[in-house]
């Protein structure tokens, strides 16, 4: 078994950079998200360090002066973990560990660990372990080179090499085994999927924590786990839903995140098949989140990676109950009105207006606007259904409000 990194992060510091591509505001947003990830993993952020630089330092991520400052803070405040807001190379991790003398994690580590903690079924656990192995494999060499150097000299190179090779082989064998295991489960699942027949399939997709599972529970009267932490859902749930007299299947699945580690996208491929095989996507967005537009872009990018970018999609803007515009001071003649000052009505007139019918505004929590949502989904599902079974067209008249 692969050893799971023990993350008992009571006290952590975050370290990020401000670069040309990533201004102060963006950097703050990213660190906010990193803090939420840390909290989800079970940690508490005591302090954030940022440094302005052209680009991250290839040896130590941030500069040595700044690193000294971090090291002192860590010592004085008995910090157990330093978390970097990007993927560190093996060499960077090694160098930094020496300087900081505490556990050093990067964004990918953190996400992998949350997935490991949250995986409930053996299927999810297998997929996470595969991602961990894939993350580890290219780093094994780095883990050993400094030992080799210490041993050094003639005649010592052999054993060092052998150890790396042995370790690599163990991890590679494990990867093969895990892939086989996943393939077996996939085979069983595709049989199950075959049994579901020809019903239209709708998949809930979106950034993590936007309310997919909450919406799933509302429309299918089911009880999927929803929580105000990241990646509450790892396993896929499929429910049969009936609107009007029209039955279809709805899938709730894992949420996406900016820079989702590629190893995870790879190993969750079969979970994501549910999305790939769907007839219609409901792209759920948390409109109350300050960077919801970036989140939409991240989700679209991942949808592209799994060949699902061009599916019929309804944008579901959720959490309208907590949407709050930053108040704009009309008397301030210097201030420029920006997106964060937009009211919901102003937002609706932006690019959202262009997608017209395909934008729905709801609160899954308070069940606001659910009738409009149901009508829109019904119409779309009916069109797909009718195209598939032209002969029972007459069965599905236009949507009529359900009597409560
Ligand atoms: N205010 C408000 N909160 C909501 C709404 N919908 C969901 N939430 C809350 O948002 C948090 C996340 O909800 P989930 O349904 O778990 O989100 P998810 O998209 O399934 O998240 P992952 O499974 O982690 O990807 C929970 O605390 C919900 O109660 C809403 O319409 N308004
Ligand atoms: Mg969920």
Image (cartoon, rainbow, N blue to C red):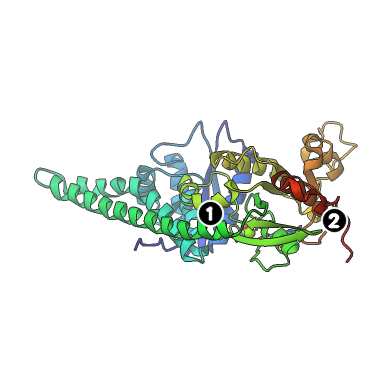
Give the residue at x 47% y 45%: 262
Quadrant observed for ligand 1 in the rendered image:
bottom right
Residue lying at the far bottom of the rendered structure: 223
Residue placed most toward the observer, 125 or 132 = 125
Residue placed most toward the observer, 182 or 318 = 182
Q: Position of residue 214 (x, y in %)?
A: 71, 61
Q: According to the image, label 2 marks what residue?
A: 371
Residue lying at the far front of the rendered structure: 391
> In which quadrant of the rendered image does the N terminus lie?
bottom left
Q: Position of residue 286 (x, y in %)?
A: 72, 50
Q: For this view, does 341 lie left or right of residue 212?
A: right
Residue placed most toward the observer, 282 or 114 = 282
- N-terminal label among 2 and 1: 1
Q: Position of residue 189 (x, y in %)?
A: 51, 59
Neighbor class of circle 1 (other Cα within 10 Å; few <14, some 14-19, many 20+) is some
> In which quadrant of the rendered image does the C terminus lie?
bottom right
Q: According to the image, label 1 marks what residue?
A: 271
SS of the residue at dot 2?
Answer: helix
Residue 36 in sight in this render: yes
Give the residue at x 27% y 55%: 170
Residue lying at the far left of the rendered structure: 155
Give the residue at x 34% y 57%: 177
Q: Position of residue 154 (x, y in %)?
A: 9, 43
């Amino acid at each position: 078994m692969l050893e799971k990194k023990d993350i008992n992060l009571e006290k952590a510091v975050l370290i990020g950079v401000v670069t040309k591509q990533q201004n102060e505001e963006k950097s703050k947003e990213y660190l906010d998200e990193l803090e939420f990830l840390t909290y989800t993993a079970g940690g508490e952020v005591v302090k954030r360090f940022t440094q302005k630089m052209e680009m991250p330092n290839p040896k130590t991520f941030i500069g040595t002066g700044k690193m000294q400052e971090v090291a002192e803070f860590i010592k004085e405040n008995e910090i157990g973990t330093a978390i970097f807001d990007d993927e560190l190379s093996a060499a960077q991790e090694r160098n930094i560990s020496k300087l900081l003398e505490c556990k050093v994690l990067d964004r990918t580590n953190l996400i992998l660990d949350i997935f490991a903690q949250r995986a409930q079924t053996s299927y999810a656990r297998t997929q996470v372990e595969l991602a961990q192995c894939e993350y580890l494999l290219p780093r094994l060499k780095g883990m050993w080179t400094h030992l080799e150097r210490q041993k050094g000299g003639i005649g010592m190179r052999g054993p060092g090499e052998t150890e790396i090779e042995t370790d690599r082989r163990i991890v590679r064998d494990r990867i093969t085994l895990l892939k086989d295991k996943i393939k077996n489960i996939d085979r069983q699942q595709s049989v199950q999927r075959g049994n579901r027949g020809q019903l239209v399939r709708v998949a809930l997709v979106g950034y993590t924590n936007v309310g997919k599972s909450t919406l799933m529970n509302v429309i299918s009267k089911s009880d999927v786990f929803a929580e105000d932490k990241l990646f509450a859902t790892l396993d896929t749930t499929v429910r049969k839903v009936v609107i009007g007299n029209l039955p279809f299947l709805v899938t709730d699945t894992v949420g996406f995140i900016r820079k989702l580690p590629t190893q995870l996208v790879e190993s969750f491929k079969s979970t994501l098949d549910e999305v790939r095989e769907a007839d219609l996507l409901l792209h759920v967005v948390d409109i109350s989140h300050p960077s919801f537009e970036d989140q939409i872009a991240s989700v679209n990018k991942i949808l592209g990676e799994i060949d699902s970018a061009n599916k019929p999609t309804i944008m579901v803007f959720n959490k309208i109950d907590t949407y709050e515009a930053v108040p704009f001071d009309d008397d301030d003649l210097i201030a420029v009105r920006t997106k964060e000052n937009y009211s919901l009505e102003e937002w609706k007139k932006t690019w959202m207006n262009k997608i017209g019918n395909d934008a729905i505004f709801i609160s899954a929590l308070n069940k606001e606007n659910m009738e409009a949502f149901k009508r829109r989904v019904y119409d779309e599902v009916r069109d797909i259904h009718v195209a598939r079974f032209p002969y029972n067209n007459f069965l599905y008249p236009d949507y009529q409000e359900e009597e409560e």
